[in-house]
Structures are given as C-alpha cells and as structure tokens.
Image (tube, grey):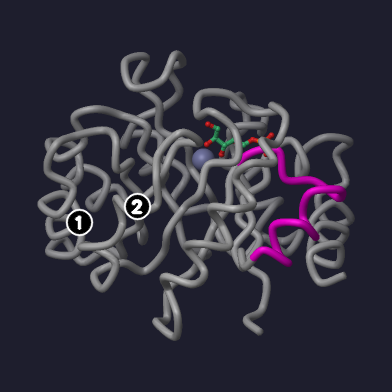
Amino acid sequence: TQDIVIAASILSADFAKLGEEVRAVDRAGADWIHIDIMDGHFVPNITMGPNIVKAIRPYTQKPFDVHLMIAPCDPYLEDFAEAGADMVTVHAEAGPHLDRSVQLIRSLGMKAGVALTPSAHESALEYVLDKLHRVLVMTVNPGFGGQSFIPEQLHKIRAIRRMIGDRPIHLEVDGGIHLQTAPLVAQAGANALVSGSGVFDGGDYAANIGAIRSAAAS
Ligand code: DX5
Ligand code: ZN
C-alpha cells in the first residue's frame, strides 16, 4: 500500500495572510499545497488566479497541486506554469479536448491530473490514463469548501483504483474529507486526500493533518 498524501486546500485559509497560511500548513506536515482555481463559469464561485499562485510560491517548497475549475483552461496553462505550479488538474467535463489539455500540461513541464465531478463516469479517463500523474475524484460538487461527502463516489474510487492497476498514478479525493470519511476513501483505494476545512478549522493545523493521516491509515 502507498503512503497517504495529505493535500491541504488553502481555499479554507485566511486569504488576508495567504503566504503565512501556506508556510504554516507546510510546517504542520502537509505534503502538497492544493490550490483551487474557480472562474464563476465552470463552477459558481470565483477564487484566485495565477498571480496569487506566483505570490505564494516563495512561502514553501512543497508541490503546488493546482485544481483548475475553469473553462476553458488551455489558454491559462502557461500562466500557471510560470507562476510555479508543479501539478495541474483539469476537469474532464470542462472542455471537448481533454487529451490536448493533458498534453499541454506535460509539455509545459508539469505533472498532469484529471478531475471528475460526482456525476462524471470514470470511462472519461480511459484513453488519457497513461499520461497522468494523478486522478482526482470530486467527493462533493466543486465550488465550495465545507460541503458534505457524497458516498456514491466510493464506488467510483474503487473502479478507478482497478483501472489504475500497477501504474504509478495517485488517486486523489477532494471534498468532505474528515475523520469519518478518510478511512472510507482510503479503504476504497484513494491515497491522496485533499482537505480544506478539515485542515484549517480549529486552527491546530498539525493536529488536524496528523488526525486525518492516521484516520486514513485505520
Ligand atoms: C471544492 C474544492 C476543494 C475544497 C475542499 O470545489 O475543490 O478543494 O477546498 O474543501 P473541504 O475539504 O472543506 O470539503
Ligand atoms: Zn480542490
């Protein structure tokens, strides 16, 4: 079994001191910094863009796991590469040419991920899987932090774990991951857990990250 990766979603951070928040979750043990980019079009919320990614880049050396909830995404991929993104995830539903987006991410020197919304079928991954560093299963409808986990996604996680087989691909889950749901997704085959409210709520980031990590291993 692979080690559990904890990706701290800074959507739940204090945006007035974002650099310090990034440094704090790094020191608290987060493996990846998960950055949610929303456009008010693909999802009903607006967050931040490449200029913010660039501004927080000096605050950590941990990988930036950039989750694009924007359509179109291709015109902005180079900007995210220049801003310091290590890994970019695009939604399979966000455009008609997923393979082109994946190829573009890789050609810019970044690791590619594909995300699926809760209603999207895992078959969308089939012909791009060998080009991916990770698959992201949304366990809430994208757009907001602090929503409730959608349990039907456990079946999809199991199906994708079978599809991945022995490929070196991370299976990441995002949305509603906390102490009760972490063991469920880990048992279903997820190895990378995004958490926003689960990391930031209460203010003790190290304790929160440690508790999610041990819940996932239980
Ligand atoms: C939602 C975002 C998530 C969000 C998760 O669209 O993709 O990354 O921050 O928040 P929690 O962990 O609070 O459900
Ligand atoms: Zn996300």
Residue under the point 66% across and 79% down: 3
What numbered label is drawn on residue 114? 2
Pick whichever, 19 or 121, lies toward us.
121
| Residue 7 left/right relative to 213 | left
Pick whichever, 146 or 182, lies toward us.
182
Image: 113 above or below 149? below
Q: Is residue 28 magenta?
A: no
Q: Position of residue 89 (x, y in %)?
A: 35, 50
Residue under the point 29% across and 47% down: 83
Q: Position of residue 185 (x, y in %)?
A: 69, 57
Pick whichever, 74 or 123, lies toward us.
123
Tell me the element at label 1.
Answer: helix
Residue under the point 58% across and 45% down: 174
Quarter of the image with the C terminus in it: bottom right
Mark 1 crowdedness (10 Å alpha carbons): few <14, some 14-19, many ≥20: many
Q: Which range is magenta?
A: 175-188
Image: 46 above or below 197? above
Tell me the element at label 2.
Answer: strand
Residue annotated with mark 1: 102
